[in-house]
Amino acid sequence: MFSSASIVLISVLIVKDVFSSSPPEIDNVLPLSPDEFSSQLPEEPPTDAQLVYRGETVMLDTYLPWMAFILGPSICTATVISRNYVLSAGHCVNAGGGKAYPSESVTIYVGSANLSNAIPHAVERIMLRSEYADRYDDYIGSVTMADMALLKLSVPLNFSETLQPIGLSKESAASAAGEGLAKAKQGEVVVAGWGNTKPHCESSPIWKLTHPKIPEQLQFGRERLFPVDECVDLEFRWYKEQMAKKNATNAFKDGSWKERELKRRILAKMADKICVISDKEPHTVVESGDSGGPLLLALGQGQWVQLGTLTGGPCHGKDAPLHDYYTQIDCEWIAIQSDDEVTCR
């Protein structure tokens, strides 16, 4: 469902606006509780429900009412975090040189799990973290740090049963280490997005939005929080395998790499990340277009929190590791940029 580099938009996605007006204002509407959510899911995924690669299709708009879709120079997934703000990955709106795309070039779609029924909203301002960096590393390829963006909408949203904000967790770091919130749920998390339904290394160019592997319907899946040190070891072994296959970056190809330096660079890349892994059949992984999508944890009693935004992962082709990584929520930065409209729980 996702790759670290978001997709350059070549063709135009036609999204039908079937609403003549915004949904009615409804306060204090909670989404389905985690138990209700799970009880209404099929025991087996529908035959056409290739996810959030190999995931399941969200058919009801009330399932994950905070989900949002970004259409602009790139296509990505995002989340509604207040009436005025949407959260996504920095690389989804990065125009280069530390600058974001012009706000008028980006549209946010919300209110429906089906893009044909989603409501478009204009963007007033796009904010990247000042520490944001997206660079090429001779050892490990693309490295993205502080990968978070805040998009302010031109007009406040009207909440309804199908449009609700997701709470943000300030326990992201603890959860990533398998502590805090994660202990109560044995580390099981939910991922979601409108990303590719075939591994990006195995599909034809997916920037063609008419490509049948880009789903119109929201997809979701379950993964497990994975300790960062184990994630680093997994990546280390994977890079060594790529080196052996001579399918690697310049440092590997010219024989100049060193194992200690390789691990150091992987550790640096993962410094602000949460790692997740799919270790149950059918394996669910994220793909291109899922960038910026949420890492969700169900707390019970109708409460969910978002732990991070999707940054990247290896290509999930044959025999590839089934892990991905999310950038931890930066509560202080979000509060400052939103003038304290959005704060973490």
Image: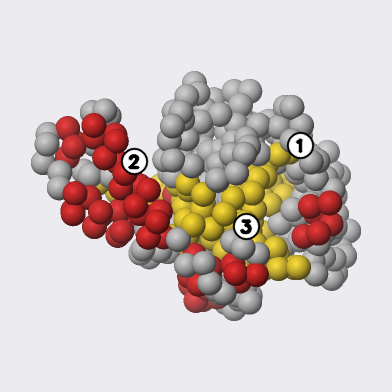
Q: Residue at x 18, y 37 (%)?
A: 252
**In this rendering, is residue 184 above or below 17?**
below
Question: Residue 53: where, in percent of width, then height?
Answer: 59, 36
Residue designated by label 3: 188
Secondary structure beneath disc 1? loop
For the C terminus, the image quarter is: bottom right
Q: Earlier in the sequence, mark 2 or mark 3?
A: 3
Q: Are marks 3 and 1 in contact (CB under 8 Å)?
A: no
Secondary structure beneath disc 2? helix
Viewer-nearest residue: 162 or 20: 162
In-image side of 254 versus 38 (left or right)? left
Q: Quadrant of residue 43?
A: top right
Q: Amino acid at mark 1?
A: Glu
Q: Earlier in the sequence, mark 3 or mark 1?
A: 1
Question: Residue 31: where, in percent of width, then height?
Answer: 81, 60
In-image side of 287 versus 303 (left or right)? left
Q: Residue at x 65, y 45 (%)?
A: 221
Question: Residue 310: where, in percent of width, then height?
Answer: 51, 52
Residue designated by label 2: 238
Q: Quadrant of residue 44?
A: top right
Question: Quick check: can you spot residue 272?
Answer: yes
Residue designated by label 1: 44
